[in-house]
Amino acid sequence: MPFISVIIAAHNRREFLLDAVNSALNQTLPKDEYEIIVVKNFEDERIDKFLEEHNVKNIVTKEEPLGAKIIKGVEESRGEVISFLEDDDLWLPQKLEIVKQVFKDKDVIYYHNDFFNFSDHISIDAVNIVFTAKSRLLRLKASDIKNFNGSVNNSSISVRKCIFFEELKEYIKKAMINIDPLFAYLAFCYNKILVFDDRVLTLRRIHKLNTSADGISDYNLWVANLAKMSKLSMSDNLLFLKMFSSFDCKITREEKERLIKSIEGAYLGWKVTYSRLPNTKNEVSLKEFIKYLKYQRNFKSVLYGFLPFAPKKIKDYVTKKWYNQNLLTKKQNKNTNI
């Protein structure tokens, strides 16, 4: 029966941290079967007192990259299985009980449950009723995985600690934000079973302090944040290319080539995203553009590839349509009766 370590990483944000911690404390899994570790870059009298009173390990670090905080937590952890929770997200009460059941199978290396985006008030009881009634577990080996598009949301991911290869820790420490796909890449390299569960066990909070642009309502701030996140994601994916190109994974040459191509595709996608914005300089070369097109599976993505080369007026028009669609989605989520 694997012991579980919960790692909650926080950078500057205080507003939602205790909500996240409470959702980890209020699990149906017995308290002696898991631990909670908070890794943050600040001290706060109220928060620190709460963590101490509830036997939560509290680590303060000046390290800025999210990857460095994750490695700090992993090195302090006692668990064979690590479950990650963002400081602004929530878990449903049965999350860790299900994680434990999944990892009873010693061949499972990675688990990803589904999640639900929310803002403002949410009824956890309603989510329990609506989203946990049915379950479909998809078990995949490395040879079955063609892309990593489903590997999103840190708070929905649990892994065995062994994926944090000693030789790769210094690379992982440098990763700024793209930790969720990195976990999938590391698990893929270990060549065991990756499990994808369609049950919603994670609630992903959308708000103005998100590192993603989803919670920002002002157009100019939204564009500026998207440009910043795209740059960081480009940097992370270049790091991953270097990292996995030189690492001897436990997979076949064909599978490793597929992994490298997936990372390269992600890098080019973020480069196109950055370069298509109205106030950024085009960084996509003709050679990269041709390579980007090879990775695209739908006509819409192909069209987006041309935008870095378009006049500023066209970029601005298309970006505003994108922004307005995000606003509409956000409004629909807000009006959902859950």
Image (spheres, rainbow, N blue to C red):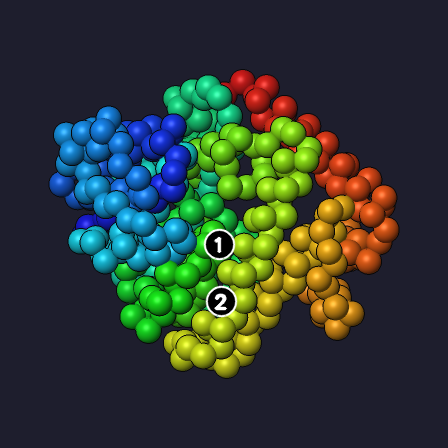
* Residue under the image location 40 percent in, 67 percent down: 171
Badge 2 amino acid: Phe
Task: From the top left corner, tell me how far across and down residue 28 is, in percent.
Answer: 24, 33
**Seen in the image, is 209 located left or right of residue 101?**
right
x then y, percent, for residue 280: 71, 51
Q: Amino acid at mark 1?
A: Asn
Label 1 crowd bin: few (<14), some (14–19), many (20+), radius 10 Å: many
Q: Is residue 45 above or below residue 39?
A: above
Q: Is residue 80 left or right of residue 235?
A: left
Say the numbered circle drawn on residue 240: 2
* 218 versus 175 height, above or below: above
Q: Quick one: 107 or 61, which is closer to the camera?
A: 61
195, 336: nearer the viewer: 336
> Is residue 164 toward the left or the right of residue 217 in the image?
left
SS for tag 2?
helix
Badge 2, how many Cα within 10 Å: few under 14, some, many 20+? Answer: many
Dot placed on the residue nearer the N-terminal end, 2 or 1? 1
Q: Position of residue 316 (x, y in %)?
A: 79, 42
Q: Which residue is mark 1?
A: 178
Task: Check if mark 2's residue and mark 1's residue have beta carbons within 8 Å.
Answer: yes
Secondary structure, mark 1, is loop
At horizontal 39% and vertical 21% (from top left) the residue drawn is 125
Q: Nearer the viewer, residue 337 or 19?
A: 19
Residue 85 seen from this side: no
